Image: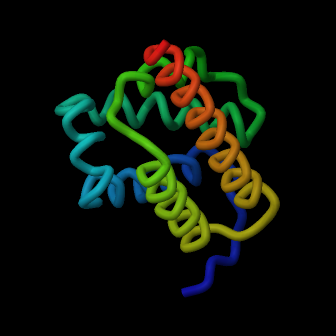
Amino acid sequence: MTPTKDIENIDDIKKMVDVFYGKVRKDSLIGPIFNDKIQNHWPEHLTKLYSFWQSRLLGNPVYTGFPFPPHAQLPIDKEHFDRWLNLFVETVDSLFVGTIANEAKNRAYKIANIFQEKLAYIHNKSKE
């Protein structure tokens, strides 16, 4: 079924996040990394993600925090980010269409790029 609406409210954000992380948790490549790190704290993690995306996409500044540090110690590289992005884009495209949906995908690419640059910097510094 082709989506007919854009991301418009917190319920849409929750749907996007829940469907996406449902896929992530089951994924053979990135699922074990997320599940090992988050363990039984998924409800709290999802709540943070709702506020993160609500802040970024709906202009409601409810997220406070720094998303990068928790990822800095994870055993992740380009392959993991590529899978994360593929699942994210697939999820958004299956649920929504429009300007905000496109912004969600653009921001996901930016986040992945920034995280990969920061991780490369950290790994290079540790080799010095």
Relative to the observer, which residue lies in front, 55 or 34?
Answer: 34
Q: Residue 105, image x and y in percent?
A: 67, 56
- Residue 105 shown left or right of residue 127 in the figure: right
Q: Nearer the viewer, residue 107 or 16?
A: 107
Image side of residue 108 versus residue 32, left or right = right
Q: Image point 74% across, 40% down: which residue? A: 58
Q: Residue furthest bottom?
A: 1
Q: How is the image coloured?
A: rainbow
Looking at the picture, tell me which residue is in the foreground, 120 or 113.
Answer: 120
Residue under the image location 25 percent in, 30 percent down: 37
Displayed quadrant of residue 95: bottom right
> What x and y, as percent, mark residue 35?
22, 40
Determine which quarter of the picture holds residue 97.
Answer: bottom right
The residue located at (70%, 59%) in the rendering is 101
Which corner quadrant holds the N terminus? bottom right
Find the residue positioned furthest to the front: 128
Q: Position of residue 107 (x, y in %)?
A: 70, 45
Q: Is residue 11 left or right of residue 54?
A: left
Residue at (63, 39) in percent of width and height: 111
The count of marks equals 0
